[in-house]
Image (cartoon, rainbow, N blue to C red):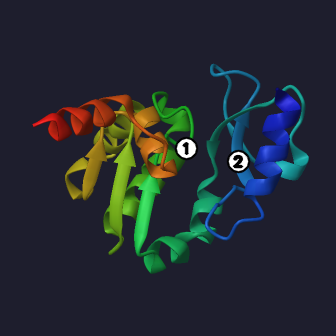
Amino acid sequence: MELRLYAEARNLIEKDNVLLPDKVVVAPNKESEPREVSVETLKKEECIFDISPLYIDSIKKTFEEAKTIIWNGPMGFFEEDKFSLGTKMVAELISESEAYSVIGGGDTIAAAAQAKVLDSINYVSTAGGAFLNYLEGKPLPALLALEEKALES
């Protein structure tokens, strides 16, 4: 499973519209003090808890130029204040952008609410997994049932 996910991640970084951080916030565990590191210097015993504000600063222009932004999932362990800055900064960049913004999933909604930007999002979907399936063009059972029922009339 891990090798498949690794290969999938490697394929993603080849795409122009997928951003992967080169700087992250790490700690040995959630009780430890965080530190910012380059992904090339990660140690096996460190856990990634957030993306680095330095990385976010390097991608601000992407948010400014975007026409549409789709956000599904917080950047890190936002429920813990010391690991929430990356998620808050991304939420603020989305809310300040002229792009049409779409967010999906309960954790994403909670993160946007915590950052006090939920009201500036153009569309909010509470169903994160179904939201992603819909974007991929996969059929959704509830929508299929509604369509079938409508055709019966």
Q: Is residue 61 above or below residue 20?
A: below
Amino acid type at image mark 2: Val
**For the N terminus, which image quadrant?**
top right
Indicate left or right for 42 with 108 as reference.
right
* Disc 1: which residue: 75
The first of marks 2 and 1 along the sequence is 2
Q: Position of residue 138 (x, y in %)?
A: 49, 43
Q: Residues within 10 Å of mark 2 (few under 14, many from 20)?
A: many
Residue in the image at 79% along x and 55% along y: 11
Q: Is residue 135 above or below residue 78?
A: below
Q: Is residue 22 visible?
A: no
**Residue 15 sits in quarter:** bottom right
Q: Secondary structure at mark 1?
A: loop
Residue in the image at 41% along x and 68% along y: 68
Indicate left or right for 56 with 102 as reference.
right
* Disc 2: which residue: 24
Residue in the image at 49% along x and 28% along y: 80
Q: Is residue 6 visible?
A: yes
Indicate left or right for 123 with 34 as reference.
left
Q: Secondary structure at mark 2?
A: strand
* Distance Cα–Cα, label 2 vs label 1: 10 Å
Amino acid type at image mark 1: Met
Q: Residues within 10 Å of mark 1 (few under 14, many from 20)?
A: many
